[in-house]
Image (spheres, rainbow, N blue to C red):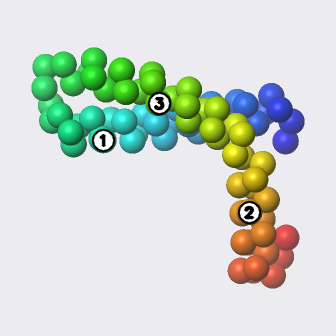
Amino acid sequence: MDGKTRFILAALMSAVMVLVVTLLVTYLNLGLRADFLAQWAKAYFIAWPVAAITGFLVMPMARRAADGIASLIGGQS
């Protein structure tokens, strides 16, 4: 996977995961208050760049680990 594709994949995957997780955690911590969307948006825009960069950096190692685990489980690579 080339760098551009890896970056796009990391950005898209992290955007969706961070959206779901920050929405859930914000709801669990605050409930549905008048400023819920503002608080959720703040959490989202802080967390998303961190998750995207982490995903971009970790993806090659995670792919190798996943290939190794799948190989051990299924006997294939």
Question: How far apart are the two marked residues, 3 and 1, measured between alpha carbons?
Answer: 13 Å
Q: Quadrant of residue 68?
A: bottom right
Secondary structure found at label 1? helix
Check the image and report above or below for 41 versus 69: above
Residue at figure coordinates x 78%, y 48% from the top left: 60
Question: How far apart are the two marked residues, 3 and 2, measured between alpha carbons?
Answer: 25 Å
Which residue is disc 1 drawn over?
A: 24
Image-based side of 32 in relation to 71, left or right: left
Which residue is disc 3 drawn over?
A: 47
Q: Are marks 3 and 1 in contact (CB under 8 Å)?
A: no
Q: Earlier in the sequence, mark 2 or mark 1?
A: 1
Residue at figure coordinates x 42%, y 34% from the top left: 19
Which residue is disc 2 drawn over?
A: 65
Q: Quadrant of residue 37?
A: top left
What's under tag 1, amino acid-wise? Leu
Q: Position of residue 64 (x, y in %)?
A: 79, 59
Q: Quadrant of residue 38?
A: top left
